[in-house]
Amino acid sequence: MLAVAAMLGLSRAALADALRPYAIVDDAIPLSLTGADGDPARGRAVVLLRQNTCLLCHSGPFPEQRFQGDLAPNLQGTGSRWSGGQLRLRMVDASRLNPATIMPSYYRIDGLQRVAEPLRGRPILSAEQIEDVVAYLATLRDQPGKHE
Amino acid sequence: MSVSRFIAAAILATALILPHADAGEVAFSERRSGSTFMAPETQAMQSNDTANPGMLGVLDGATLWGKTIGAAEKSCASCHNDASTSMSGVAARYPAFDDTLKRPVDLEQRVNLCRVDHQRAPPLAYESRELLALTALIGRQSRGLPIAGGTDPRLTPFVDKGRATFMRRQGQLNLACTNCHDDNWYKRLAGSAITQAHPTGYPLYRLEWQGLGSLQRRLRNCMVGMRAQPYDADAPEMVELELYLMSRARGMPIETPAVRP
């Protein structure tokens, strides 16, 4: 039990130190956070999982999801409006583009106040999850695509 | 698109599409109780005393009101007599300034101060059945009366602090109360109406809780949703937030015990 807790503590600390560096060019992060392409099917699952918070505010082409929010744009057509790099920056830290945005920064651990203790030092999503979501959103074209 | 062009476009879009965005506090004339967002069935449940489950707490409170407790062997009624007379309008002006403590106390704290100081009895736990019942009984005596929170000038600095907490972003999701309850109250978070966060009916019966709960419990629900570290029950920030919300809702009628989804 203690050993497990110690391992979890260690991995959390390691994660906190290991936010992967990224470079912003104009309004985009052109390069993958992981160095690899994400998986669109996994990305769809990340978006739909309630605890990841996307559907609290966004709606989208998810007819099987009964409760979707309307605080933020419908995700339909996202891939036609933005490049992968633009989507990546909007996921990682949308406040860089609009300090007044209500879109949380999904890959950021600094500059936050009163974060719940178990979540301190952890981004909302991992780099791998960000890449999966970026890959999925890129498939959401104005013309219905294969993932809809 | 360059960053500056993007920001300019975002500001323009905001101005065109979202008339309420970043508009600051909800306009006085636009204020609406949470009950106006509810389904007619839930509204009917609230307005009919025989269907309102919160009334069980009020009845419970009436029993406790007359019960002799503590080393002083007093009941609430020993000093305050008939609650329907003595408590009329009291909940509408809480949190109120305490002369001894030199700070605002909420209704729950007032009940416990009375117990400790006058009845010589132990304080009741927050969210305990007894404390919810007594505050429901007291709140019920203000039903229909206008909220008069924060009118005492000694409360002004505490109202301001509560307002600052309401406006401050917090938690892993980095949201402030105002982001939803001033700027986006007319929208839906997942399937649920956001509402303007006016504390008109506490303690209230929340269907999601299957029970009565205090305003502090509701505030804590939101903080957990923002993935913020909730404040302790006695934290001054909680009372300041309650006070700000009551001053923000000034003039709106008390609905206690309200029913909410």
Image (tube, rainbow, N blue to C red):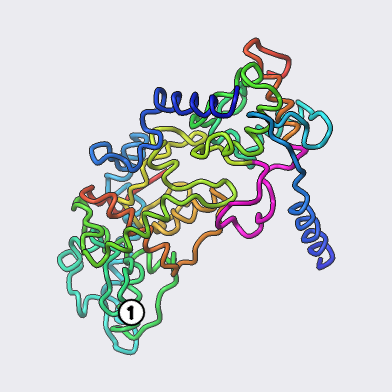
Where is residue A59? Give x, y as percent: 56, 27
| Frontmost residue, B109 versus B229 | B229
Element on which disc 1 rests:
helix
Up/down of B160 relative to B71, above or below: above
Residue at 40%, 37% (x, y): give it: B22
Query: Magenta stretch: residue A123 in it?
Result: yes
Q: Position of residue A10 (x, y in %)?
A: 80, 60
Could you tell whether B39 is left or right of A121 in the image?
Answer: left
Q: Residue furthest bottom?
A: B71
Quarter of the image where one finds residue A42: top right
Q: Which quadrant would residue B193 be assigned to in this image? A: top left
In this picture, is A116 found above or below B129? above
Q: In the image, A43: left or right of B11?
A: right
Amino acid type, mark 1: Arg
Residue A20, percent from left and from top: 77, 44
Q: Which residues are magenta?
A: A106-129
Q: Residues within 10 Å of mark 1 (few under 14, many from 20)?
A: many
- Image quarter where the N terminus of chain B lies is top right
Establish if B132 lies above or below A23: below
Q: Mainly helix, strand or loop, the magenta region?
A: loop
